[in-house]
Amino acid sequence: MRVFKRYVPTGGELVVRLLRRWTGGPVWMSGTRASALFFERVTRGFEAIHLLLFVLFTVPTALALADGRAGRAALAAAMAVYLAFTVHPVMLQRYNRIRIYRVLGLSGRRVATAAPLK
């Protein structure tokens, strides 16, 4: 995940560094509990989007294979792309949430009932 995280287009370390340079400040988190809880919610949203995209891309591809419109090689290539652009980002979001939970001293079940944002 660390190698993938470095090069992810919308939140990878290279992009975050550029954004920090352009904005002159933190991009996602400012070091407060409130920003960490906000980022935790953002990761859940990004994860849901990527899971939805995986389903939306995989179902038509599987149907094309079943109908004979696509061969196994095309399916394998498509699935490799889908995995790279949907499943890896899901894993990245989960990885980031685990890091946030450690910082906040929370378990995943307790985040929804964590102290309100101030």
Image (cartoon, rainbow, N blue to C red):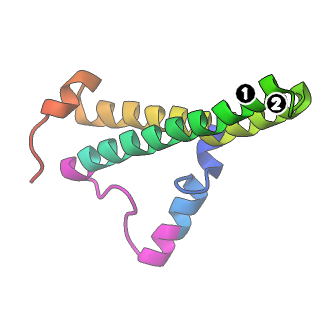
The amino acid on which the numbered mark 2 sits, given as a three-letter code, is: Leu
- Would residue 69 be visible to someone looking at this image? yes
Q: Please give the name of the residue rendered at 47% of the width and 32% of the height, measured from the top-left corner.
A: 95
Q: Residue at x 66, y 40 (%)?
A: 3
Q: Is residue 114 left or right of residue 15?
A: left
Residue 14 part of the magenta-drawn span: no
In the depicted view, which residue is nearer to us: 83 or 69? 69
Pinpoint residue 73: horizontal percent, then vertical percent. Answer: 90, 29
Residue behind mark 1 = 62
Q: Is residue 23 magenta?
A: yes
Q: Which mark is residue 75?
A: 2
Say which residue appears at 61% left-offset and 50% top-offset: 8
Neighbourhood count class around disc 2 (C-alpha, 10 Å): few under 14, some 14–19, many 20 upward: some
For the C terminus, the quadrant is bottom left
Position of residue 38 relative to residue 14, above or below, is: above
Residue at x 12%, y 49% (from the top left corner): 117
Q: How far, Cα to Cα, is label 1 from label 2? A: 8 Å
What are the residue bounds of the magenta stretch?
Answer: 19-35
80 or 74, which is in the foreground?
74
Give the residue type at disc 1: Ala
